[in-house]
Amino acid sequence: MKDSEILERIKRGEEKVLDYLYKKYYRMMVKIVITNNGTEEEAQDVYQEALIVFWQKVISDKLVLTSKISTYLYSICLNQWRKELDRKSRLSHVEKDGEEYQRLEEEESYQIVVDCIEELGDPCKSILIFYYFDGMSMSDIAERMNFANTDTAKTKKYKCKKRLDSLIKKRYTKKDFFN
C-alpha cells in the first residue's frame, strides 16, 4: 500500500489501516525504544501513542507530510520516547533528593541521641553504647562493667534509658525527629 493510499483510507475512517501500519513498522519502532534503554512493553506503548497522534493529524487535516509515513512515525516515536526518558529522569532525581533528605534527617536524629548520651556521663554512657550501638548482651555488659549480675545491668540500663528519654524530651520536640 502506498503512502497516499494509506492517507486516503485513514481520512475515510478505515481503521484496518492502523493494523496494517502497526504490523508493517512494528519492529522498526520497537527497536528505537529498546536501543535507547527501554523495554518492549514501553516500546509498544510509545508506538501505539504515535499511531494515535498520526491518525488524529490525518483526520483533522493538520498533517503536512514532507517525508514517508515510516519516517514520520519514526520521528513521533523518538520524540515520545525522549519525553518519557525525561519524565523518568525527573522522577529519579526527586526520589534521590527524597532519599538524601531522609538520610540527613536520620543522621541529625542520630547525632541528637549521641550528644545526649555523652551528656549522661558514665556509667550510663557506657551501658547505652554497649547495648544499643555495640549490640552487647546484658550478661556481657554486667561482666564488662563489673556489676553483681545481669539483673543489676538491666536495672541500670532501664534507669539510664529513662534519663536519656527525659533529657531528649526536655531539649527537643517530636518535630525534631518526625516531620
Image: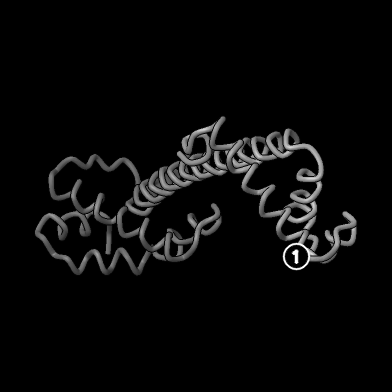
Front residue of 60 and 93: 93
Report helix, strand or loop for mark 1.
helix
For image coordinates 45% across by 60% down, the residue present is 28
Q: Residues within 10 Å of mark 1 (few under 14, many from 20)?
A: few
Q: How many marks?
A: 1
Instruction: Work out whether 173 lies above or below 148.
Output: above
Query: Which residue is under mark 1?
Result: 151
In the rendered image, which quarter is residue 12 located in?
bottom left
Q: Quadrant of the N terminus?
A: bottom left
Q: Position of residue 155 (x, y in %)?
A: 71, 58
For image coordinates 14% across by 43% down, the residue present is 61
Instruction: Work out whether 132 lies above or below 41.
Output: above
For image coordinates 72% across by 60% down, the residue present is 154
Q: Residue furthest left?
A: 12
Q: Position of residue 119 (x, y in %)?
A: 73, 33
Q: Residue furthest front?
A: 148
Q: Position of residue 149 (x, y in %)?
A: 83, 65
* Amino acid bearing label 1: Asp
Front residue of 11 and 50: 50
Q: Quadrant of the C terminus?
A: top left
* In the image: residue 174, left or right of residue 135: left
Q: Position of residue 14 (x, y in %)?
A: 13, 65
Instruction: Work out whether 81 lies above or below 34.
Output: above
Task: Name the image colouring.
Answer: one colour
Front residue of 57 and 44: 44
Instruction: Work out whether 112 lies above or below 138.
Output: above
* In the image: residue 93, left or right of residue 151: left
In the rendered image, which quarter is residue 151 located in?
bottom right
For image coordinates 32% across by 52% down, the residue present is 69
